Image: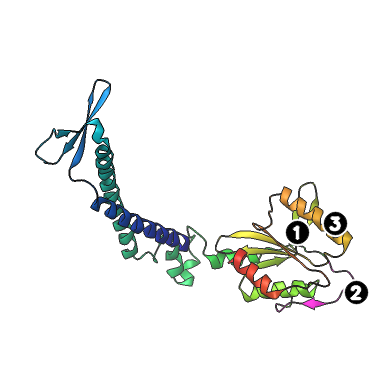
Amino acid sequence: MEEIKNLLEAREDYLIQLKKNKEKSLQFAPEGSLRINRRGTRMQYYHRNDPKDFTGKYIRRENFELVHKLAQKDYDKKILDALEKELEAIKKYYLNDPDRNVERIYESLHEERQKLITPILETDEEFVRKWETVTYQGKEFSEGMPEIYTAKDERVRSKSEMIIADLLSKEGIPYRYEYPVYLKNFGRVHPDFMALNVEKREEVLWEHLGMMDDENYAEKNIRKIAAYIQNGYYPGDNLILTFETRNTPINQKLIMQMIQHYLK
């Protein structure tokens, strides 16, 4: 619903500006209107200044610019009329309490009544609840690996992953850690995070590549990124990539910016 409001506001701004432009154009338009008459294969143009004069005065070829101005005037008047009607419709929409739209009627009901009803559209809360309750088998931790836990007491493999996970949690972004994804012609992978953009209800994979100064590691992950792309996961779209080396550690400020950009 918020997206519809934003579209309406943008449309309203566009219409208001267009209305100002057309009103200004009409101020400089010539008096009267244009009558067009076909005579054989030729078109004849007449300038009507008197509403009672249904014929008008013939416009000669040397004054053809007047024909264009009168035609433009008629067009602009029709545009202005349509603009006013559309702006009035938008105004009525706002006056009709747009916050109480059909999707939000379910949210307004008592929770006990909600349990008895199948809504036309799941609320964000219900959608997230179902998304978060999906069970899956992540990757196992090798014996002897350091035990690193997030603020949600979830074990991860590195401090950088812990930072990303905690920032996702802080911003209220639902995620699954190392959720299995099958890539055609590559096999099963476990991206570090599968995050959910709640507003768009879109899943976004997040790979943090933390040893890019290791040649073998970099080569392996370049092949994986290629496989992601071949399977419809595009960096900067539904695939977030962050990088790290020994000399260039994770930047929390940049991570937060990426969360705001891709997942909010």
Q: From the image, tell me which residue sits under label 2.
A: 144
Q: What type is the residue that disc 1 sits on? A: Pro
Please, is residue 155 above or below residue 64 in the view? below
> How many numbered marks appear?
3
- Residue farthest to the front? 62
Q: Nearer the viewer, residue 204 or 88?
A: 88
The percent position of residue 214, horizontal first and vertical second, equals 87, 64
Left or right: where 126 falls relative to 219: left
Left or right: where 225 falls relative to 40: right
Q: What type is the residue that disc 2 sits on? A: Gly
| Residue span colored magenta | 140-152
Q: Which residue: 31% across, 65% down?
A: 95
The reply to whether residue 174 is visible in this rendering is no
Question: For the residue carrying disc 1, how many other residues have a C-alpha within 10 Å: few (<14), some (14-19), or many (20+)?
Answer: some
Please, is residue 40 above or below residue 188 in the view? above
The percent position of residue 223, horizontal first and vertical second, equals 81, 53
Residue 168 lies in magenta, yes or no?
Answer: no
Distance from disc 2 to disc 3, alpha carbons, whole Å, reads 26 Å
The percent position of residue 243, horizontal first and vertical second, equals 76, 66
Q: Which residue: 25% across, 47% down?
A: 77
